[in-house]
Amino acid sequence: MKSKLNTLKGLGILWLMLTGLIVNAQQDPMYTQYMFNTQTINPAYAGTWESVGFMALTRQQWTGIEGAPKTYTFSVQTPLKNERVALGLNVINDEIGYEKRFSVHADYSYMVPVSNKSNLRLGLKGGFTNYSHNLQSHQLSSTGAIDDPMFQGEINSDFMPNFGVGAFLYSTNYYVGLSVPQVVVNEFENNYNNYKSQAQLRHYFLIAGAVFNLGENVKFKPTFLTKATNGAPIQFDFTTNFLIKEKLWLGAMYRTGDSYGFIAQWIFAQKLRVGYAVDFSINELRNYNNGSHEIMVSYELRFYKERVVSPRYF
């Protein structure tokens, strides 16, 4: 119990140190089903499934607006023979208009037992992002972007290396995670006009959730995600989900200053999960788009038959 309290105290101090240095801005992809897609933002999440797991997610944001963000994510995680060590891989393709980001990052996590029911995983993330933006594709007038010297050439950063860190404290019925998935602030430059701008900002994430029994066949899971970076207000995602007969998740979410939405996920034999989420803008964009849509599919392979695996709620 003392060890668990010391761990929670340490994580709290770490988060206060991080938030004391920042204000915040949204640049990385956002996900409504963040509670099932934690590995993309926290490398310490790798290994929490206690199985070889695959997850694919597509998000079409602000449908109906030309050039709106589109994000495609694929993640893999697997424990090693040493059960305390796990590896992961994340591939993300993010497109916003003519701006494209393609990233590949590997994860390493190490588990430290805190008590008989709780574990703390510490993680490292490392990889690269390829960024491109063809400025000449923008149509600024009837003659195109060629009239504006600031829209000449192409921004092309073929290789931007980065690394991240994270911590994830969890048991069967709760979790708390802290992470900085991109520590290095990379820049890109316009090869034509020779100017530079920040391509990757340092984002900070705090995520937490818990599961409560409401009866024999119903569980209640409240979760939240805090996102922060320099230059914009801190953003909070609050979500409530209900699990019915260990088969069907149904929930709703609210993202401060941005949107509200709904989530559904069906679980097949504790291995295959298919989820769908939709959210609707509450700001000025609400009159110009038809909502944001996510589809997620995950599958688990269990090779260690002798290992007893607890039901997974996160």
Image (spheres, rainbow, N blue to C red):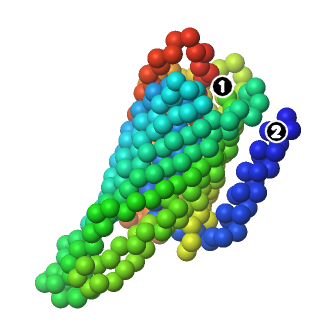
Task: Tell which circle, 1 or 2, labels the residue nearer the N-terminal end.
Answer: 2
- The residue at the point 52 percent across, 34 percent down is 86
- The residue at the point 45 percent across, 51 percent down is 126
Depth check, front residue: 62 or 137: 137
Indicate left or right for 57 with 227 as reference: left
Q: Of the residues shown, which amino acid type is indicated by label 1?
A: Val
Q: Secondary structure at mark 2?
A: helix
Please give the residue where the numbered disc 1 appears in the rendered image: 218
- Residue 157 visible (yes or no): yes
Q: Position of residue 260 (x, y in %)?
A: 54, 53
Would you place residue 82 above or below residue 65 in this image? Answer: above
Is the residue marked by circle 2 packed among few (<14), some (14-19), or many (20+) residues within 10 Å?
A: few
Please give the residue where the numbered disc 2 appears in the rendered image: 3
Would you place residue 195 above or below residue 207 in this image? Answer: below
- The residue at the point 65 percent across, 20 percent down is 217
Quadrant housing the N terminus: top right
